[in-house]
Image (cartoon, helix red, strand yellow):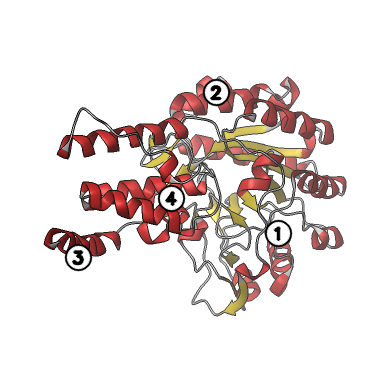
């Protein structure tokens, strides 16, 4: 009895440092029983709770269904060691199995998830891509934080680890501060607005789109890129953007959108919105990012690309980027804390240039399949690039590579500006 009370005290202390309290009641009861039976340490309880949480999120049943059968030939510490080893192997086997999305009717996103508030910022400035790394080939994109946080619920989103998940904020004086930004007229800028929020889901709230249009019109040496998963182009159809404002869409096959990009516009609505803007002369672009491995990915992505090529001519499209899931540890922790029904972490995570992602062979297969699905005309006339990926992937996928970020940046800007001039 004394040992049980003593371990209960220890268990209460170490459990607070794990995901144990986040588990469903049935899983929590099972893990509690195994912990007392085997006397889990902090690290062991952390591992078992993490596996249990993943199984719940992936709809793979409770941890009891994956717990190894009794090991009769060993006992004591060796028994615990073997049980945990077998459990971890089963967990890893699941992660190596492509995701299965059974329907195209994913979870709904509560309208009350976020509230919109106005704030006063000390200043507005241009920054650089927050995920840039010397280990990856980067285009040196500059960023402009128009809105802080996104109202969509993409299960893989890194923004969720930086902001209050229930609040979206905008600077009340954004337009004035944007107009006052110092811009060198002898320099070509490439500025994106989709790093801290979706560029179009809020429309012209607070006059943000009008301010961006004025900014782009005033500075023809700026390539201003909006990035979205919405179909909210109504304001841009009423007030046509200047030629140097490019509207781009992040795309995924319908099963991925329905299950992992909650609240966003379906694929067909995204493409129809892009078509409307293209019809009025606006340059568009597409990001196959993040590509996600699921059981029909090798059919889903080529089908998406075939549809894209039917709807758009290459001279209407500035760029196509390819990239896949890449996580930092705080985002992984946040995903597990939230506990959405999602398979987004059901992948063989390996170290990738300071972050965690798919193994190289998976990335190469996915990128090559996508790129080879485009016609030769698209490959010649559209600027293709890998976003946030190591330079070692470029030559195997595209047949060429850039020796430095600076040359990559220069080539990208030159290509975009050439297409912009045809619309000026």
Front tag of 4 and 3:
3
| Mark 1 / mark 3, whichever is N-terminal | 3
Label ID, residue 200? 1
Alpha carbons under labels 1 and 2: distance apart: 32 Å
Asked which secondary structure carries label 3, the reply is helix
| Mark 2 / mark 3, whichever is N-terminal | 3
Please name the residue that numbered disc 3 is placed on: 9
Q: Is residue 222 visible?
A: no
Alpha carbons under labels 2 and 3: distance apart: 50 Å
Residue closer to the observer: 217 or 303: 303
Q: Determine the residue positioned at 58% across, 61% down.
A: 183
User: Mark 2 Cα within 10 Å, few/some/many (few <14, many 20+)?
Assistant: few
Alpha carbons under labels 4 and 2: distance apart: 30 Å
Asked which secondary structure carries label 2, the reply is helix
Please name the residue that numbered disc 4 is placed on: 53
Please report contact status of discs 1 and 2: CB closer than 8 Å, yes or no: no
């Amino acid at each position: 009895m004394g040992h049980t009370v003593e371990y209960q005290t220890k268990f209460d202390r170490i459990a607070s440092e794990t995901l144990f309290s986040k588990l469903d009641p049935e899983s929590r009861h099972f893990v509690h029983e195994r912990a007392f039976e085997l006397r889990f340490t902090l690290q062991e309880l952390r591992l078992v709770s993490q596996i249990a949480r993943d199984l719940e999120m992936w709809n793979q049943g409770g941890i009891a269904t994956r717990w190894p059968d009794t090991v009769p030939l060993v006992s004591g510490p060796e028994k615990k060691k073997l049980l945990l080893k077998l459990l971890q192997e089963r967990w890893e086997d699941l992660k190596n199995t492509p995701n299965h999305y059974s329907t195209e009717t994913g979870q709904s996103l509560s309208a009350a998830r976020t509230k919109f508030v106005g704030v006063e910022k000390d200043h507005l400035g241009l920054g650089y891509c927050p995920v840039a790394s010397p280990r990856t080939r980067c285009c040196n994109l500059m960023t402009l934080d128009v809105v802080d946080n996104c109202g969509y619920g993409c299960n893989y989103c890194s923004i969720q680890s930086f902001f209050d998940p229930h609040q979206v904020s905008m600077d009340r004086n954004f337009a004035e501060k944007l107009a006052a930004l110092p811009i060198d007229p002898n320099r070509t800028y490439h500025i994106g607005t989709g790093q801290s929020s979706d560029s179009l889901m809020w429309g012209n709230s607070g006059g943000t789109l009008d301010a961006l249009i004025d900014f782009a019109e005033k500075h023809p040496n700026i390539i201003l890129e909006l990035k979205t998963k919405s179909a909210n182009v109504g304001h841009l159809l009423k007030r046509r953007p200047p030629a140097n404002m490019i509207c781009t869409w992040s795309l995924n096959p319908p099963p991925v959108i329905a299950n992992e990009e909650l609240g966003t516009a379906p694929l067909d609505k995204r493409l129809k919105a892009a078509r409307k803007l293209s019809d009025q002369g606006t340059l568009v672009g597409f990001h196959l990012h993040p590509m996600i491995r699921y059981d029909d990915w090798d059919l889903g992505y080529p089908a998406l690309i075939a549809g894209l090529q039917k709807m758009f001519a290459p001279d209407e499209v500035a760029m196509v980027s390819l990239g896949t899931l890449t996580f930092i540890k705080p985002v992984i922790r946040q995903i597990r804390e939230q506990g959405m029904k999602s398979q987004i972490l059901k992948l063989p995570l390996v170290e990738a240039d300071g972050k965690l992602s798919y193994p190289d062979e998976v990335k190469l297969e996915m990128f090559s399949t996508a790129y080879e699905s485009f016609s030769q005309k698209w490959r010649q006339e559209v600027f293709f690039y890998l976003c946030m990926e190591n330079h070692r992937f470029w030559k195997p996928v595209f047949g060429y590579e850039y020796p430095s970020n600076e040359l990559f940046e220069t080539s990208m800007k030159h290509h975009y500006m050439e297409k912009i001039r045809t619309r000026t």
